[in-house]
Image: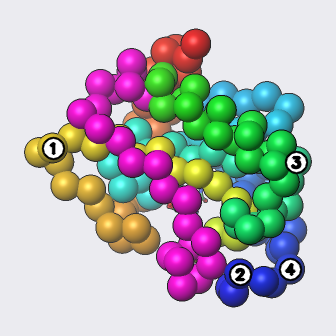
Amino acid sequence: MTLKAAYDPDNIFARILRGEIPSVKIWEDEHVLAFMDVFPQSEGHVLLISKTSTARNLLEVEADTLARLTEATRRTARAVDRALNPEGFQIMQLNGDAGGQTVFHLHVHIIPRWADRPMKGHGHAPMADTETLRGLADRIAAALD
Ligand code: 5GP
């Protein structure tokens, strides 16, 4: 999808928000949902989405939505750090097909990194099992401010 297409209300994250397909949630409030990426590029790969905005990418997002998403990313990254003790982490946010984006509801990735563990390629990671993701999500949730 190009940068300038219409929002698809049936994209995967919209369906997760409506409870039509399951997800492993870490935390949520009225504005933001943090949940586990089901094809994790590293252990503890987290996604954050707005629950209210239909922005598909950074070009479309409202300033207040972006501010909330950014603060949610900071808060969740601190919890990932406490829970999983990575040596580093990447914040990733992709825009448009050509930018590598595959789900067209704006989202931020937190990808924990360890020097001796190679990161799996975007779109090439195997699906994780729900129990493993639930365990990681519970550890991250327990470490939230
Ligand atoms: P993008 O490529 O748009 O930046 O990232 C979309 C992300 O959503 C990918 O990392 C992909 O693994 C993840 N993903 C795709 N389908 C699902 C799903 O059904 N559930 C969850 N939790 N993540 C998904």
Q: Amino acid at mark 4?
A: Ala
Which stretch did the figure color magenta? 80-101
20 over 88 or under it: above or below: below
Query: What residue does disc 3 label?
Result: 52
Dot 4: element: loop
Q: Could you tell me how far apart the alpha carbons at marks 4 and 1 are, in whole angstroms?
A: 40 Å
Q: Which mark is residue 6?
A: 4
Q: Amino acid at mark 2?
A: Leu
Dot 1: element: loop
Dot placed on the residue nearer the N-terminal end, 4 or 1: 4
Q: Which mark is residue 115?
A: 1
Dot 2: element: loop
Q: Amino acid at mark 1?
A: Ala
Q: How far across and how far down the image is residue 20, in percent?
A: 80, 54
Q: Which mark is residue 5?
A: none
Dot placed on the residue nearer the N-terminal end, 4 or 3: 4
Crowding at dot 4, Cα within 10 Å, few <14 / some 14-19 / many 20+, comes out as: few
Q: Which residue appears at 74% of the width and 68% of the height?
A: 59
